[in-house]
Every structure is written in C-alpha cells, then in structure tokens.
Amino acid sequence: MKNIIETFEGSKHFRLKQVADGVFAAISIPGTGSVGNAAIIDLGDSTIVVDTFTTIHAAEDLKAAAMYLTGNPASYVINTHWHSDHTSGNQVFASEAQIISTSATREIMDTFGRNRLAQQLSNPKPIFQAIDEIETKIQNETDENLKRDMQWENASDREYMKILPELVYTLPNITFDHHMKIHGSDRTVQLITYGGGHTQSDAFVYLPEQKIAIMGDLVLSKHHPVLNNANPHEWLNILEQVELLNIETIIPGHGEVCSMKELYEVKDYIKNIVVLVEETVQSNRNINDISIPNAYQDWYFSTYFKSNLQKVYDVTIKSTD
C-alpha cells in the first residue's frame, strides 16, 4: 500500500500516511488550505472521510485521495467539531456522502457558523485588513517560532479568502448524541462523543479492532491546544474517559500521527496552564507576563498561547464570582 500512496499525484495541502490496513491520515502541510488534519477509512464496500479541511481546493484533493486509495467515493463524512478547518470542505462531498456530526455541532454550524460566513461574504474587507496588519507584525517579530506560526496562519487565511466567494456552507444531515456505529464489509467504526471540551461538542472516531482513534482537536501532537471555545475542565474529563478505551495509535487534529503519549501531553498542558494562571491571579500579577514554559517552546500554534491564558483566566475569574 505504500506504493499506492507514492503513486497518488499528491497535494500541496497534505501528506498521506498509512496508519493501518485501510486507514490513512492526511496530515496538513502548514500554510496551505488544509490547516487541520483529515483521515480516510476504507470500510471495504464504502469509504469514510473524517474532517474536510479549510478550503474547497484542499477538500477536492482529499476527495480524490479517498477515491484513489479505496476505489470508492466517500459515502460518509464525519465532522469532529464545527471549526472551519474541519468543515469548510463539506460542500465538495455533499453530492455523494452523508455528512455526520453531533447534534450540538450541527446546531452551532446552523447558527453561529452560517451567520459568520454570511458576514464574511457581505463584508470581507476587515479580514483582508487584518491579514495585512498581521503581515506587518510578522516583519517586526523577533521570536522565530512565533514568526513562523504567524506566517503559516496568514498564508492559510489568504488561501481561505481566495475560495470565500465559492464557499457554500454545508451542514451535516445526520446527527447523533452519544454513540453511533458504521458497519462496512471489512471493518466497523464507532463515532463517540463525551460532550464538549475543545469546543461545545467534540466527537472522535474509534476503530477498536485496530486500536486507532481519530481524535479531532481533542488531541494535538506537538501543537498548543486551542482553548478559545474550550471548557478546560471538561476537556480533561473527556480525555480521562478516552484513556479507558483500548487505543494505541492516534490521528490528531493537528500534527503527526502519534500515540497515547501525546494525549497525556495535552492533559499536562491544560493542567499546567490552569495552575500558571491560578498562581498568577493569587499573587496579583498580570497573566501577560507569563512566558511559554520550556516544555512547549518548540510546539506549533504558539500564537494561541496568550489567548489560552486569557481563556483560562476568564474561566478562573468566573468560577470565583
């Protein structure tokens, strides 16, 4: 199967990696129209795609890869959560695939997500202005890791703006609230949600026989977890439940294919951020003075560290009111 990956024409948006028999990761190439990872699962008589990238072009390449690797068009698309780097490519698959998410994820997409896109389409000028402003900040940034991440994010935002006029917001048409199974001739997958941690509602895909989980953004590999829409304490609770499953290999929402080690690293990160913020508040210091801990200095998504501190601060203050 390695040869079939190598003979695929390829994509500037992702690298394919075979994780197990019939299971493939599409690992995002930074600064392109993917942003997040995706996955392809060959059920034998049908095909599943997990998450659909940020742009139409990246999703079209993912659709072609799924057909090339499995011999079948995608029959099912799973959205692990509502963020645009996991859902904006849905329209590419809608004519042939059932799109599945949790009920809460679909509700968020149908309200907040749809309204946000309508605003972007009606008035894209502020987004272009923000991209130009960040470009200026990049030129003046002295932290090389932060500069790299800012460059990649701005490049991805430019890719998104190129396809914005063509974007058709495409909602899931099948939803579930706790657990769902999809049976194929070769394998069965489980769709599971334990509620919301990274967002208001997060799902993941579990292949128990192969001990694989496709975790969405509940697990990232060597990337700062993104807490903007998060409930940090619920996130930790979810990961503790995931630990009870028999998992050896993880396809994360961002970063390379990994193992339970990276799940534990995400748990430690969230715990450490909470402690850092609580200690800072108790000593009447400013959270803006907190630097990235050494353990995470080389992690990607360093641009999110300050907003992660702010999110935990807001949660901490709210809990003391």
Image (cartoon, rainbow, N blue to C red):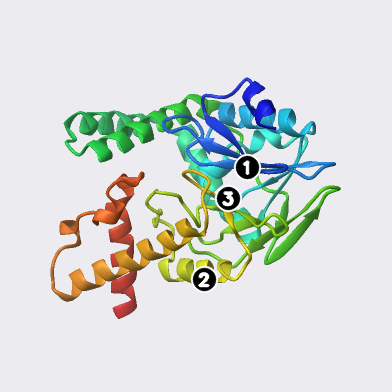
Report which residue position mark 3 lands on. Answer: 109
Q: Judging from the image, what secondary structure is the residue with disc 3 in?
A: helix
Q: Quadrant of the C terminus?
A: bottom left
Q: Which mark is residue 28?
A: none
Q: Foreground mark, 2 or 3?
A: 2
- Marks 3 & 1, CB-CB < 8 Å contact: no
Residue density around tag 3, few if under 14, some if 14–19, many if 20 or more, within 10 Å? many
Labels 2 and 3: the sequence-earlier one = 3
Horizontal and vertical percent position of residue 142? 16, 36
Q: Foreground mark, 3 or 1?
A: 1
Q: Judging from the image, what secondary structure is the residue with disc 1 in?
A: strand
Q: Judging from the image, what secondary structure is the residue with disc 2 in?
A: helix
Horizontal and vertical percent position of residue 73? 77, 33
Q: Quadrant of residue 144?
A: top left
Q: Which residue is at 74% across, 30% downward?
A: 67
**As displayed, is residue 189 above or below residue 68?**
below
Can residue 107 be seen in the rendering of this structure?
A: no
**As displayed, is residue 266 above or below residue 129?**
below
C-alpha distance separating marks 1 and 2 = 23 Å
Out of 285 and 223, give the one closest to the viewer.
223
Horizontal and vertical percent position of residue 289? 15, 58
Would residue 67 appear left or right of 267 to someone viewing this image? right
Labels 3 and 1: the sequence-earlier one = 1
C-alpha distance separating marks 2 and 3 = 27 Å
Report which residue position mark 2 lands on. Answer: 240
Report which residue position mark 1 lands on. Answer: 39
The residue sitting at the bottom extreme is 320
Amino acid identity at mark 3: Met
Amino acid identity at mark 1: Ala
